[in-house]
Image (spheres, rainbow, N blue to C red):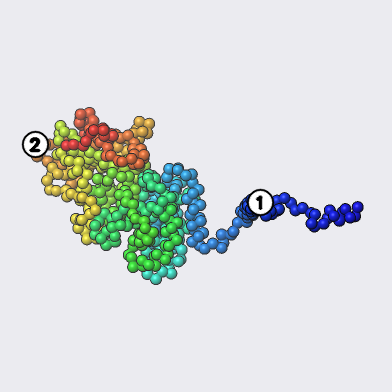
Amino acid sequence: MSHSRLEQSSPDQVKPPRFFVISDKPHDIFVFFIRLGVLVCLLISITLALYSAFFKPSRLFLPDRLQATDRARSTTTSDRPGAATNISHILFCIAGSENTWQDRSRFNKLWWLPNETRGFVWLDKEPRYDVSGAIPFKISNYRWKSFVHGQAAVRISRIFKESFKLGLPKVRWFVMGDDDTVFFPENLATVLGKYDHSEMVYMGDNSESVEQNLYHGFAMAYGGGGFAISSALAIQLSRIFDGCLRRYYYFYGSDQRVWACVNELGVTLTREPGFHQLDIRGDPYGILAAHPLVPLVSLHHLDMLEPVFPNMTRVDAIHKLMGAYHIDPSRILQQCFCYDHKRHWSVSISWGYTVQVYPTLWTAKDLQTRFRTFQTWGTLSDGPFMFSTRAMGPDPCDKPIIYFLEKVKNVGNGAWTLSSYKRHKEGEDGRSCTRLNITPVVVERVRVAALKLDPKYWKKAPRRQCCQIMNGGLIKNGTLRIRIRHCGPRESITV
């Protein structure tokens, strides 16, 4: 019995498990290594799964710039993919100072929507006054003081980076502006919605004045009119920003420095002419009465220009314009033309602002050319500008009778608007035009009916709408009635 047990326990007699048997045959060796590989892969997979489930490296050991990038990625991917851009996706980054904010906040209160808009005005120090109802403020980080040159411009430039580092959720666009910039947020969201925030986009427009562009640059977006940086661009720009600011210490403005840094990433300016720097002096009427065929996004330098409506303060005049904007945001300042062929009149409408009635017939090309009611910002000259202008000549037949917005209201269950424009009698000459024995009937008021303009209109190739003088041109109680409508497929605006 004992001998038998010894035989069974002899090393030569114990057979190893079949899995580990290595044969001298090539086929068996190949099979062995396959099994070994499967076992190793299984062990690695189990190890990685346990590591991911029970151990996460602390972000405290990440450099600041990587933490900022990580936060940005979380903010830009947390909202639902494919959802349309709206006001909540915009973070306003407004440049201000303690010395100017109390006065300029009056403009800010006109467009800021406390329950909808997001953002901050960044000041150089704690304000000594209370500004309730305006955009909340933050104090710029002290790091701007470490820059040797142009500290004020550096502080304003870094507002972008400080806003980015806040890591606020669902931010698709960082929009910079000045504390005297008036934004039109719904139109801004419409314009930004045309572009993909996951791509690197730098958006804005030039100055209106050629001399300003010659001095500062044609390829940059001017900060007073505002410019937008997509979240994808913000991630990369924040990474190089402080070092880049030191390289371009010799630039004058903060917007010029931001542009130089964006340019180092190979990103060029996407132009949207609804951003208005308004580097002009005098009366902005000529620009606003012939607005380009784009949504109105911003207006700047309003505290340096004449009021947009006569006989009003600057703030009250913008408040009136904003009232029309809130009723039909997409249509504000949109221009259209029509003719009264019986009387040889030309009519130009800038919705929500002004109507012009010419006592003679003018082409569409002339009607969309801006009256030169303003001068250049620097030299106070008559140009050149980045667009065509025309003088309001001495011939009374060349001058329109001008009507300014009186009121606007919703009609037709809110689908339509009815706006009225009252004749402005100061300096008018149109009534004295007697060429070809034309004596225009005095029109005291113009009423305009229009179907509200769908924001989706701006996602298509835009076409200027047409207008039509109603009731055969009948003027009743001094009122001329006009309707704005879509142009027919084969319709043209022809004298």
Q: Residue at x 24, y 53 (%)?
A: 386
Instruction: Reply above or below: 173 against 60.
Output: above
Count of labels shown? 2
* Closer to viewer: mark 1 or mark 2: 1
**Which residue is farthest front?**
25
**Given contact means CB atoms under 8 Å apart, are the residues at marks 1 and 2 in contact?**
no
Name the residue at 91% across, 52% down: 1
Vertical relation: 440 (above or below) 28: above
For this view, does 50 lie left or right of residue 322? right
Dot 2, how many residues are within 10 Å of its Cα: few (below 14), some (14-19), or many (20+)? Answer: few
Is residue 439 something that shows in the picture? yes
Please provide percent x and percent y for residue 231: 43, 53
Residue 437 got which mark?
2
The residue that disc 1 covers is 28
Q: Position of residue 456 (x, y in %)?
A: 36, 39
Q: Amino acid at mark 1?
A: Asp
Residue 471 drawn at (x, y percent)? 22, 28
